[in-house]
């Protein structure tokens, strides 16, 4: 279908660009799927600019993943008359389309995007805010300004480094050079360095000392001393060092904050739910904003749509997939009159539902709102800050003793020596070590599918002493099953029949069965019927074969073992069943054993029926296994452990873990597709890499060694510099060599350290 | 002597021009997407002749 569309418009080059362009089409566009875009309130969320003949709309397309996507999406104008231009922002997975609203409607554009395989994400949350992007932009400009001033100041300080004689370099020329440097340092001090002044001042006002405070102090003293020196014509000051440090620290900050733009960590239920629903009003179906739905309304929900609020089924056959909500992967059959909780996904035909609660008051959204009220996690007592406090204390003691020494020897030298010491020993080295190491680590972890929200999460991860895993959907997959057989023995022919029948059905259990049952001969099913939520029946060789639920097959044999049971019966005479148990992802058991050394580990499962002793045998006796945990129970478990003084790291998936993820010290959301919706968390982790988790934790721990190493190195430089400064020998040349040398060696050491660690620990 | 000062001022003015260009490029969003631009330039325009 996509091919036909492309063929008509001579765009077949698409297939030459990449081996596997595009993504398999999930489903066809339903006629009224994008009706909601005709509501002005909905359209206004996506349209950024609008006039008589031109409008511009921004959609998020989570399926963008390669250069072919880019190529195709930017050819939209040739696919649809009325579209003036389209531009893709790859990293944000956004498309900006300008079009003529008199020729083509927003709805048509959305349908066109869906038909080529890129369905726009229309969620209740609407267009995303880009505040973090703005902060990063400002940081880049600050860095640019600092870099510009640094280059020019270093050029102007060159004569000072050479210690030229007053005849060669003196008088007017020297004044020009020095005052120009001072002029250039002003924007660095008042604009670029604000990056450090502001947070330092804010934390001081709140009564604690962060790493920014001593750094700001050093910058201020550096600038003040330079002004005094230049104005009094006693020296050239340390403007080159000051600008250099500001510049390098800004580079570190930018690196550290360069996180994934396409991922959002602060999601709540609003980004999971659709933006509008089809309300039935006097027998007529009309699109309504989800926020305008009230209890008592009747809505229509189509196949693959999400139930927006707790409701009672009034018409249609409901087969609800709650896999994201509860972790249960098998769709649940509901009868007319049953209560259906919000968050489930309909997997059968259209439904009519009578809402019994508002969207924001439904069971799960309530849980979520409750969770988000928990206070901000504090980063004040991280690993760096105690180190910074000690460092500042030692430095102050040292400076005071040196000052007393010079007071007795030569009181006139106190001021220059003390300021020089404070300048040289600025804890910038410490800050640089941490920012660069964490920046490199965040980038390295990105490559292994472990996307952290920010560097502070890495520091918190270091202090975790209790790991809690969710079982269903996190440690186990929703696709692979371990299958056991029971009841009567299947003959070869019968196995072939069941294989053919299971192959006809789209139900996840059928698909799992079809892959394990052996096919012995080709078989064409003629009389075949699937009853959703019940099973499949067929007439083969004059025999009535049924495959499905125990009730459907009238099976006398049953099993109370954990897992889903699929029964079969042939002519009502021979009976048997399969038990399908969700399988652990490959390698996760080994990962758990590795992780266990020295840490507490808990496994939470929402399963009611699963066999605890069997599970205990799989994961090991020293893991605390807790079954039948509701979403609220999970959250309370985390809260009780936290109040007992444990630092809990929760690893979970869907909505059922959302509360626990928020409550935990570090919340890690595991997802099969990182661009899909995942609950609010600190880390988004690619489920396929879960077996790497233990290694990632070790990697994060070794990062601390890199910081210590590079910090130790810079202390060596500092001692050297302090020796010069304490003896009153700190010439501009020595300062100009020492400070960049220490900064650059930190950058090199952290980069090399992280690179070696990631090669050794992660690439296998 | 004054020649050096003149050259110095000229060089700062030129460098300042580049700084302004840099600020403009950041503000107009050119640092946002480094994937799109680098791939876009590699595609050939389809032959347009009749």
Image: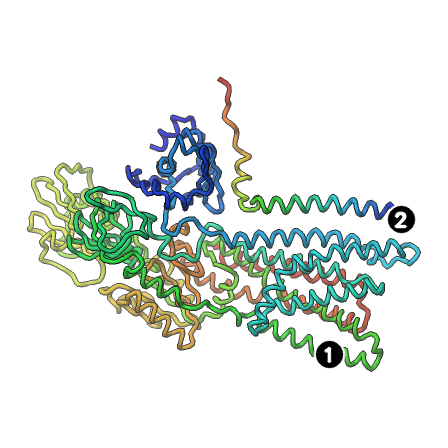
Q: Is residue B11 left or right of residue A460?
A: right
Look at the image and tell me whether residue A478 can be seen: yes
> Residue A615 placed where, x, y %?
29, 66
Q: Is residue A280 left or right of residue A433?
A: left
Q: Gap in Å between the C-alphas at discs 1 and 2?
A: 44 Å
- Number of other residues with Cα within 10 Å of mark 2, as a class: few under 14, some 14 to 19, many 20 or more: few
> How many callouts does the rendering have?
2
Q: Chain of mark 2?
A: B
Residue A2 sits in quarter: top left
Look at the image and tell me whether residue A322 can be seen: no
Tell whether label 2 touches label 1 (CB within 8 Å): no
Q: Chain of mark 1?
A: A
Q: Which residue is tagged 1?
A: A400
Closer to the camera, A407 or A515?
A: A407
Secondary structure under tag 2 reads loop
> Residue A24 placed where, x, y %?
35, 40
> Residue A612 placed where, x, y %?
26, 68
* Residue A321, placed above or below residue B14: below
Residue A106 sits in quarter: top left
Closer to the camera, A82 or A753?
A: A82
Q: Which residue is tagged 2?
A: B1
Residue A683 sits in quarter: bottom left
Q: Is residue A183 left or right of residue A681?
A: right
Secondary structure under tag 1 reads helix
* Residue A417, placed above or below residue A110: below
Extreme residue toward the front, this view? A52
């Amino acid at each position: 279908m996509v091919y036909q569309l492309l063929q008509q418009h001579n765009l077949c080059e698409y297939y030459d660009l990449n081996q596997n362009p595009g993504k398999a089409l999930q489903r066809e566009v339903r006629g009224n799927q994008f009706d909601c875009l005709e509501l002005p309130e909905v359209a206004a969320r996506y349209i950024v600019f609008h006039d008589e003949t031109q409008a511009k709309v921004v959609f998020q397309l989570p399926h963008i993943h390669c250069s072919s996507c880019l190529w195709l999406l930017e050819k939209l104008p040739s696919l649809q008359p009325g579209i003036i231009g389209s531009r893709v922002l790859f990293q944000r997975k956004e498309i900006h389309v300008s079009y003529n609203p008199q020729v083509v409607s927003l709805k048509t554009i959305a349908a066109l995007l869906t038909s080529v395989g890129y369905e726009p994400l229309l969620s209740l949350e609407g267009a995303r805010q880009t505040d973090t992007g703005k902060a990063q932009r400002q940081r880049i400009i600050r860095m640019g300004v600092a870099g510009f001033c640094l280059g020019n100041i270093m050029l102007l300080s060159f004569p000072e480094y050479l210690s030229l004689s007053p005849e060669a370099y003196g008088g007017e020329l020297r004044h020009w050079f020095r005052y120009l440097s001072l002029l250039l340092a002003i924007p660095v001090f008042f604009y670029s360095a604000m990056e450090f002044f502001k947070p330092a001042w804010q934390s001081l006002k709140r009564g604690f000392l962060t790493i920014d405070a001593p750094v700001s102090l050093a910058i201020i003293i550096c600038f003040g001393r330079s002004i005094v020196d230049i104005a009094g014509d006693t020296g050239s000051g340390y403007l080159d060092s000051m600008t250099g440090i500001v510049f390098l620290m800004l580079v570190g900050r930018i690196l550290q904050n360069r996180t994934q733009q396409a991922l959002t960590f602060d999601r709540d239920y609003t980004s999971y739910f659709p933006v509008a629903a089809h309300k039935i009003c006097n027998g007529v179906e009309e699109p309504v904003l989800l926020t305008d739905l009230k209890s008592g309304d009747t809505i229509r929900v189509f196949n693959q749509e999400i139930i927006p609020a707790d409701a009672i089924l009034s018409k249609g056959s409901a087969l609800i997939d709650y896999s994201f909500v509860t972790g249960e992967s098998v769709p649940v059959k509901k009868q007319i009159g049953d209560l259906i909780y919000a968050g489930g996904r309909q997997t059968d035909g259209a439904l009519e539902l009578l809402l019994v609660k508002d969207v924001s008051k439904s069971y799960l959204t309530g849980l979520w709102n409750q969770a988000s009220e928990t206070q901000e996690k504090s980063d004040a007592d991280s690993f760096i800050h105690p180190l910074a406090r000690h460092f500042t204390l030692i430095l102050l003691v040292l400076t005071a003793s040196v000052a007393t020494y010079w007071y007795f020897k030569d009181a006139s030298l106190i001021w220059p020596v003390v300021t020089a010491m404070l300048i040289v020993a600025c804890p910038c080295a410490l800050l640089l070590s941490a920012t660069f190491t964490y920046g490199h680590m965040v980038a390295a972890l990105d490559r292994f599918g472990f996307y952290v929200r920010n560097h502070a999460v890495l520091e918190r991860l270091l202090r975790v002493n209790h790991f809690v895993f969710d079982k269903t959907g996190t440690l186990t997959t929703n696709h692979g099953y371990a299958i056991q057989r029971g009841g009567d023995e299947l003959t070869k022919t019968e196995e072939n029949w069941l294989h053919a029948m299971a192959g006809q059905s789209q139900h996840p259990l059928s698909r799992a069965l079809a892959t394990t049952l052996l096919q012995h001969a080709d078989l064409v099913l003629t009389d075949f019927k699937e009853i959703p939520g019940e099973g499949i029946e067929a007439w083969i060789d004059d025999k009535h074969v049924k495959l499905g639920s125990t009730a459907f097959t009238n099976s006398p044999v049953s099993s109370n073992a954990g897992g889903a049971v699929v029964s079969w019966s042939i002519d009502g005479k021979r009976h048997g069943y399969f038990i399908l148990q969700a399988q652990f992802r490959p390698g996760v058991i080994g990962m758990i054993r590795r992780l266990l050394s020295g840490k507490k580990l808990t496994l939470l499962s929402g399963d009611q029926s699963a066999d605890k002793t069997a599970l205990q045998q799989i994961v090991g006796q020293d893991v605390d296994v807790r079954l039948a945990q509701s979403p609220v129970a999970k959250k309370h478990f985390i809260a009780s452990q936290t109040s007992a003084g444990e630092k809990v790291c929760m690893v979970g998936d869907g909505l059922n873990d959302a509360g626990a993820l928020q409550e935990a010290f570090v919340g890690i959301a595991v997802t099969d597709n990182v661009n899909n919706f995942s609950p609010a968390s600190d880390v988004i982790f690619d489920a396929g890499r879960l077996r790497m988790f233990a290694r990632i934790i070790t990697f994060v721990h070794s990062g601390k060694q890199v910081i210590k190493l590079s910090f130790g190195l810079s202390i060596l430089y500092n001692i050297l510099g302090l020796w010069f400064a304490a003896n009153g020998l700190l010439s501009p040349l020595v300062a100009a060599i020492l400070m960049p040398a220490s900064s650059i060696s930190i950058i090199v050491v952290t980069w090399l350290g992280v690179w070696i660690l990631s090669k050794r620990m992660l690439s296998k | 002597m004054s020649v050096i000062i003149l050259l110095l001022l000229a060089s700062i003015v030129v460098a300042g021009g580049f700084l302004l260009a840099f600020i403009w490029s950041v503000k107009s969003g050119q640092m946002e997407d480094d994937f799109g631009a680098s791939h876009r330039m590699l595609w050939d325009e389809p032959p347009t002749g009749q």
